[in-house]
Image: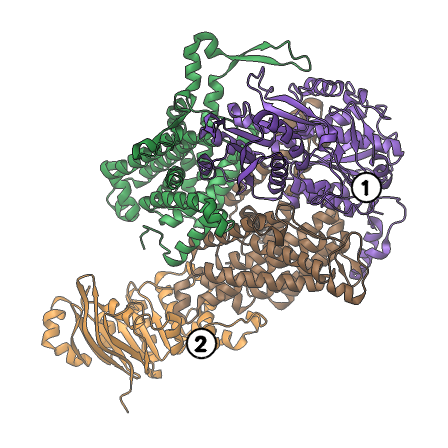
């Protein structure tokens, strides 16, 4: 297989005031791979993710997604999504006033109709194909019983899973997951891992930011370790496990 | 949001038919509540339309505009100018009003929607107040200021002149020979109200409507889901602006006059009150709210001692005196007080408006029925 | 040159009034997070405290006036004058300053009652609901005032001793320039009140807690401080400031039931231009808009831009909101 | 409601109900269902005739509206033979006998104009369409008066204007079905100018502050016209926004403008505020060009002047009527109004009372309520004993021509109501103008009985 890079981060630096948040980050995400970014609290993981999707503007360096420059402010969030990048947030961002089914249908519309479409003459009921697809996905997530419940009333774990479903229905080329299992019970975490593995088989590229090493080592093909804003190590899970620098900087203080 | 329901087609058709029946029979049921005369019925329809349109913006997206009266005024002015320059026929007047209010809505909406929340409200308020102040004074050559834009039998009316239509002594709008005042005017308004209601229902049941609610619900998610919220918001803003323009046009059609005070911020506040009072974000609520407020304005304000005395004449004198003492502050010149109290009560106890009240009462019935069935 | 100086004074004077009203509004927004459309009504209530005080002081002995035969007319002499002669007349003359003292407890009570009875139930509701319920309250309050005092303006006069004008021009060598004493007093008064509020927030423990609460409410709550109670008092304080602004304004603008609504839109524009929740911004914006309004009302300007004085406030608001949405001094 | 209300203009309700019950095609039906049973709209069929009193009950002019309503109720009483009869006893050419009008008892309905054209028209329409009123009267602003007058012309009822001072009401926008007893800006200018000349001389420079809407402009125009013709100069005429509140930024430029007279073309709250503030700025105490600075308020209203308190003392202006007049008519009216309500009537109350009586009298003279008959009776009608001396309803523009009062704020009021002192009664001849004079020329049109 050719090593095609979906996302390339080249020479990115970011400072807040005098504080260096990211130092000379170079990272290439290979197509079809699951790439995990780990690191202790305050290592700059979220800053890196927000820089990737153009929410933060780096001081220098570039971020390219399949040849398109995403560097800070160049692309709108919806523009980046339309390129095929979906994102799961650390605190779930869903539509609390809509039902689960509608929550999942909305991103499907975005995928099908683009950033704006004025379609009032075909009622929701007539969108049969899209509905069925959304319903199937909810079944995959074992949430079909909740399809007509308002999403605002879900538990936090279910909200996270719903958000994941909302991303998956778009079949993104790149899925960014910001601690997808944080705050979940072990049982839910395992279910989510299974789900993510299933997607992996479909060949979707993913970037995961995660604390939970269990999740990381179950899913990741490659791992980058971030410490104090710099990548101190990168490699396969096995390489990382044995990496002395990592042990010193990070794993020494955490359990695996 | 309860209103975005995936209702079945038959149910929707049924709702629409009921609505049509209620609107068309308004002169009959209006009689029982003292509202059975053309002007008030016209006002019900016109402000109902205004509120329906406003609800598409405020109810679905949550953007609270304090400037929609500006579009109402623009619609009225455009209509009267069409009557003056082109023809007394209502069709070109409506088209002209819709086009002009749409242009205004695009410009004001484009600028105002760059901000959200209270900033958006203040921006719309500022635009409307500027329009009002200018229309009242500096723009008098176009608007005839305080007096309001009126028709004259000597106006040019080029289309009518070309078609050889005789100028009337008292110019009244018409629709191919039917003079649009009195009940004919009401039915013209009613037809457009029904059309407006149908379109609003379409929007409520469409992906577009669902996306508007999604924007209200979580704008960040909406953006990261691949939607650009601003064109959606602008479309909703323009649609509601056009509804307002259409309402303004109808006002000028049934009564050919356009005054600046239609654009004042308090007039914008009125449509907010209507929408909230009836039930924001619901299909029927805004129309109910509009009818309630117009009913208060026209019927409650006309209640004087004489009327109260005759209303309480069945009571013994001492009791009727007490009844008058208790009700008098809220009617006649006190109808604003009544409105304020009612409005506060609704916001505090029934945030879903009259519609929620109806639903709760319906809920009680349903429950008691269930209990019976269970037993 | 004289004209410019006078317009600066006019602007400062207007600005003082705007700033006072906006100060309370922004204080309430900053602390309680409530958009209070009844704030204008508080201003109006303050003015009517002055009216009531005057009415009380001038309760009169009525003597049938026989010179009028068409209807029963009375010659009225206030009891204060009957009983105390010149002293009584002087007391009546000072009814506005007296009203200030009386307005403080009354407005505080009104404010506390409003917060306890209504506003606090709306902390968790969204801004639209707050706007609407307080708007409803404003209507109710002004209708009650109208039912009791009528719709016409009711004149209030400043004490005779400050009825004339001060030769302010003498200070800078422009002899001809005079400015009414009462307006200068109003300006000084507004500066003192604004300064007082700032000092209160800056130098007292109470104020420090409130400022901390404005900055991060949950944080302060976590420290075990009962921030809610303090916020209630802040609302009362805002009501007092608005009320005092109203009392002091009565000799300039004879109060009527609608004056609160007339100021409401304007004060919101001031708050937004200053930056929602920024006290310094509200004050700065108040003075800025006052001065702009004065300058754009000058004939020289109006000849070039007819009607500009009618819309300048709104134009500034639109420009600020589009160019600098957080206002002059607002936080992001 | 009585059976009088069965018919509504061009459409009979019963006919309508049939049509709408049958089919939705009823939309097209109304025009072919034109009623022929009535000679004119709202022809009273029972024992009563209904008048519509449309006054501001909310908004800035609510107190004035309340006073108008008091006067109307009093007029109805007098027409129906209750009370002391008021001006019925003093009016000349009066055919009313205190037993109603044309044998029918007078009833009335009330409504709130809110001083907004739309609301006023809606309220008037309710009276016409629902309550069966044959005449609409009242109002406290010219915008509203013109709007309602236009409506009455369309609907085919008579409009008897209340307080409206703009020339347009019986000028540019005059209507065959509309009548005004109140005076106007042209008359104010013509009446005031000679007094101003007498009191202040011919070498004066005036500075106008003008409410920025049509009435203000019209007032400014007439004062300018008449004062300039007697040699005054105009330093500037500045437009102020309606409801400005604080006028300081408009007043300070007056101080150094070289003007020695300030003309405040304001009414209502604007007048109260601008006058209060102008006095506060020391204009009254000023000396300019060796002369005492003067302030003029062309249209005075006692009710509103109360709001300016002390500040109106010595200020010149004009008014339509004042309760301190001592002619028989005024005395009779003030007496019965005072007895009823405990205080004297305002000029608004007076004009409304007189209008009601004049209308009733015209109906009685015509023997019908048909607007065309009433108009014939009112046009050119001459009367006296109603407080303004000999008066004529001019046929050409439906404007009453009568003497105009020039008044001055009373320096030593004997009571809280004694605010205005009559300086001069300017005779009618001096304030009369040609009906086709530039700026006031208009088309009356034809009478419209509505049916």
Residue placed at 43% from the left, 49% from the top? C127
Spatial CA span between label 1 and label 2: 63 Å
Do labels 1 and 2 touch, CB within 8 Å?
Answer: no
Q: Is residue C67 above or below residue A213?
A: above
Q: Secondary structure at mark 1?
A: helix
Residue C146 to residue C271: above or below: above
- Front-lying residue, D186 or B157: D186
Question: On the image, numbered disc 1 is attached to which residue?
Answer: D5
Q: Chain of mark 1?
A: D
Q: Nearer the viewer, residue B289 or C294?
A: C294
Chain B painted colour: brown
Question: In the displayed structure, does residue A227 sit left or right of residue B8?
Answer: left
Q: Nearer the viewer, mark 1 or mark 2?
A: 1
Mark 1 Cα within 10 Å, few/some/many (few <14, many 20+)? Answer: many
Q: Chain of mark 2?
A: A
Residue C238 sits above or below residue A28 on the image: above
Q: Could you say which chain is coloured purple in the image? A: D
- Give how far across and how far down residue A231 sits, in percent: 17, 74
Q: Which chain is green?
A: C
């Amino acid at each position: 297989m050719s090593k095609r890079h979906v996302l390339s981060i080249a020479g990115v630096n970011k400072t807040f005031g005098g504080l260096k948040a990211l130092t000379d980050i170079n990272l290439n995400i290979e197509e079809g791979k699951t790439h995990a970014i780990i690191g202790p609290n305050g290592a700059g993981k979220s800053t890196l993710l927000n820089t990737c999707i153009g929410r933060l503007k780096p001081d220098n360096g570039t971020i390219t997604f399949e040849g398109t420059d995403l560097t800070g402010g160049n692309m709108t969030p919806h523009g980046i999504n339309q390129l095929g990048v979906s994102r799961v947030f650390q605190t779930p961002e869903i539509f609390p006033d809509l039902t689960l089914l509608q929550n999942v249908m909305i991103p499907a519309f975005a995928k099908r109709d683009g950033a704006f479409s004025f379609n009032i003459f075909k009622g929701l009921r007539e969108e049969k194909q899209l509905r069925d697809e959304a319903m199937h996905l909810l079944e995959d997530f074992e949430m079909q019983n909740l399809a007509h419940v308002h999403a605002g009333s879900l538990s936090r774990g279910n909200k996270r899973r719903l958000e994941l479903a909302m991303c998956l229905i778009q079949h993104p080329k790149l899925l960014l997951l910001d601690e997808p299992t944080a705050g979940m019970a072990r049982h839910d975490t395992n279910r989510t891992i299974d789900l993510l593995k299933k997607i992996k088989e479909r060949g979707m590229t993913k970037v995961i930011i995660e604390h939970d090493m269990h999740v990381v080592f179950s899913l990741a093909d490659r791992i980058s370790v971030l410490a104090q804003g710099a990548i101190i190590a990168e490699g396969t899970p096995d390489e990382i496990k044995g990496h002395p620098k990592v042990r010193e900087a990070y794993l020494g203080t955490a359990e695996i | 949001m309860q209103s975005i329901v995936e209702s079945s087609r038959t149910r929707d058709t049924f709702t629409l038919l009921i609505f049509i029946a209620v609107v068309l029979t308004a002169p009959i049921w209006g009689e029982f509540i003292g509202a059975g005369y053309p002007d008030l019925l016209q006002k019900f329809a016109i402000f109902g339309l205004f509120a329906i349109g406003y609800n598409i913006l405020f109810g679905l997206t949550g953007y609270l505009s304090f400037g929609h009266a500006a579009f109402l005024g623009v619609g009225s002015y455009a209509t009267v100018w069409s009557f003056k320059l082109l023809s007394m026929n209502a069709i070109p007047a409506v088209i002209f009003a819709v086009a002009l209010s749409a242009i205004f809505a695009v410009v004001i909406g484009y600028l105002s929607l760059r901000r959200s929340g209270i900033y958006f409200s203040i921006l719309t308020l500022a635009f409307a107040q500027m329009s009002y102040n200018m229309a009242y004074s500096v723009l008098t050559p176009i608007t005839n200021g305080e007096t309001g834009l009126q028709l004259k039998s000597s106006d040019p009316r080029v289309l009518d002149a070309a078609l050889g239509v005789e100028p009337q002594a008292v110019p009244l709008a018409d629709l191919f020979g039917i003079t649009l005042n009195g009940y004919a005017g009401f039915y013209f308004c009613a037809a457009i109200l029904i059309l407006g209601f149908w379109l609003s229902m379409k929007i409520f049941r469409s992906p577009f409507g669902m996306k508007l609610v999604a924007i209200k619900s979580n704008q960040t998610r909406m953006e990261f889901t691949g939607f650009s919220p601003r064109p959606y918001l602008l479309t909703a803003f323009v649609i509601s602006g056009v509804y307002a323009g259409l309402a303004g046009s109808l006002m000028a059609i049934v009564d050919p006059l356009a005054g600046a005070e239609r654009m004042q911020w308090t007039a914008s506040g009125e449509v907010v009150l209507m929408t909230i009072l009836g039930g924001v974000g619901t299909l029927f609520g805004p129309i109910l709210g509009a009818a309630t407020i117009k009913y208060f304005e026209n019927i409650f304000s006309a209640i004087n001692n004489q009327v109260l005395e005759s209303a309480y004449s069945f009571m013994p004198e001492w009791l009727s005196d007490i009844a008058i003492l208790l009700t008098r502050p809220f009617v006649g010149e006190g109808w604003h007080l009544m409105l304020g109290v009612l409005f506060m009560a609704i916001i505090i106890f029934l945030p879903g408006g009259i519609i929620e009240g109806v639903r709760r009462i319906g809920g009680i019935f349903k429950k008691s029925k269930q209990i019976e069935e269970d037993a | 040159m004289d004209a410019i100086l006078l317009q600066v004074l006019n602007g400062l004077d207007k600005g003082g009034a705007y700033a006072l009203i906006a100060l309370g509004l922004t204080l309430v927004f900053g602390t309680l997070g409530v958009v209070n459309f009844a704030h204008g009504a508080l201003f109006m209530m303050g003015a009517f405290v002055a009216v009531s005080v005057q009415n009380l002081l001038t309760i009169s002995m009525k003597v049938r006036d026989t010179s009028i035969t068409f209807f029963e007319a009375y010659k009225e002499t206030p009891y204060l004058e009957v009983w105390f002669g010149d002293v009584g007349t002087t007391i009546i003359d000072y009814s506005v300053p007296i009203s200030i003292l009386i307005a403080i407890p009354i407005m505080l009570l009104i404010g506390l009652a409003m917060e306890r009875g209504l506003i606090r139930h709306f902390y968790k509701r969204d801004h639209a609901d707050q706007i609407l319920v307080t708007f409803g309250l404003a209507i109710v309050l002004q209708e009650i005032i109208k039912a009791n005092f009528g719709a016409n303006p009711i004149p209030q006069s400043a004490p005779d001793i400050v009825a004339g004008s001060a030769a302010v021009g003498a200070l800078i060598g422009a002899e001809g320039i005079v400015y009414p004493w009462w307006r200068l007093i109003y300006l000084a008064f507004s500066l003192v009140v604004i300064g007082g509020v700032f000092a209160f927030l800056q130098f007292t423990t109470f104020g420090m807690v409130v400022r901390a609460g404005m900055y991060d409410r949950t944080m302060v709550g976590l420290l075990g401080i009962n921030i809610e109670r303090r916020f209630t008092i802040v609302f009362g304080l805002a009501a007092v400031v608005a009320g005092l602004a109203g009392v002091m304004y009565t000799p300039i603008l004879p109060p009527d039931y609608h004056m609160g609504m007339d100021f409401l839109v304007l004060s919101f524009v001031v708050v937004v231009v200053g930056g929602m929740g920024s006290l310094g911004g509200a004050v700065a914006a108040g003075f800025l808009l006052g001065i702009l309004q004065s300058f754009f009302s000058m004939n020289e300007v109006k000849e070039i831009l007819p009607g500009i004085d009618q819309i300048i406030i709104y134009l500034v608001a639109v420009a600020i909101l589009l160019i600098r949405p957080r206002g002059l001094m607002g936080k992001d | 409601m009585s059976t009088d209300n069965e018919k509504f203009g061009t459409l009979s309700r019963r006919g309508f109900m049939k049509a709408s019950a049958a089919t939705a095609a009823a939309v097209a039906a109304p025009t072919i269902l034109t009623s022929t049973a009535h000679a004119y709209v709202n022809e009273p069929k029972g024992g009563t005739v209904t008048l519509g009193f449309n006054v501001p009950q909310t908004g800035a002019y609510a107190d004035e509206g309340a006073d108008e309503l008091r006067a109307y109720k009093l007029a109805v009483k007098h027409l129906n033979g209750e009370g002391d009869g008021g001006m019925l006893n003093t009016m000349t050419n009066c055919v009313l006998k205190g037993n109603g009008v044309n044998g029918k008892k007078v009833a009335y309905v009330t409504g709130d104009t809110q001083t907004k054209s739309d609301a006023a028209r809606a309220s008037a329409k309710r009276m016409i369409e629902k309550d069966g009123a044959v005449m609409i009267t009242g109002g406290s602003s010219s915008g509203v008066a013109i709007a309602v007058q236009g409506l009455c012309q369309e609907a085919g009822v008579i409009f008897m204007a209340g307080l409206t001072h703009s020339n347009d009401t019986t000028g540019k926008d005059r209507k065959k079905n509309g009548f005004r007893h109140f005076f106007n800006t042209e008359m104010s200018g013509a009446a005031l100018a000679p007094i101003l000349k007498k009191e202040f001389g011919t070498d004066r420079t005036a500075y106008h502050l003008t409410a920025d809407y049509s009435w203000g402009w019209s007032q400014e125009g007439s004062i300018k016209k008449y004062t300039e013709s007697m040699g005054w100069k105009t330093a500037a005429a500045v437009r102020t926004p309606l409801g400005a509140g604080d006028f300081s930024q408009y007043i300070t430029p007056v101080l150094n403008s070289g003007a020695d007279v300030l003309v405040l073309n304001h009414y209502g709250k604007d007048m109260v505020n601008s006058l209060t503030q102008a006095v506060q700025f020391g204009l009254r105490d000023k000396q300019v060009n060796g002369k005492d600075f003067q302030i003029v308020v062309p249209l005075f209203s006692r009710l509103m002047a109360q709001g300016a308190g002390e500040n109106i003392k010595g200020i010149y202006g004009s008014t339509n009527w004042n309760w301190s007049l001592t002619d028989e008519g005024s005395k009779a009216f003030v007496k019965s109004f005072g007895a009823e309500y405990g205080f004297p009537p305002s000029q608004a109350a007076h004009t409304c009372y007189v209008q009601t009586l004049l209308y009733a009298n015209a109906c009685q003279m015509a023997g019908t309520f048909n607007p065309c008959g009433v108009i014939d009776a009112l046009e050119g009608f001459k009367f006296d004993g109603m407080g303004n001396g000999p008066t004529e309803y001019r046929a050409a523009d439906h404007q009453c021509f009568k003497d105009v009062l020039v008044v001055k704020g009373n320096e030593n009021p004997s009571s809280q109501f004694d605010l205005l002192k009559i300086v001069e009664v300017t005779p009618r001849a001096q304030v009369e103008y040609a009906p086709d004079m530039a700026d006031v020329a208009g088309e009356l049109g034809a009478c419209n009985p509505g049916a």
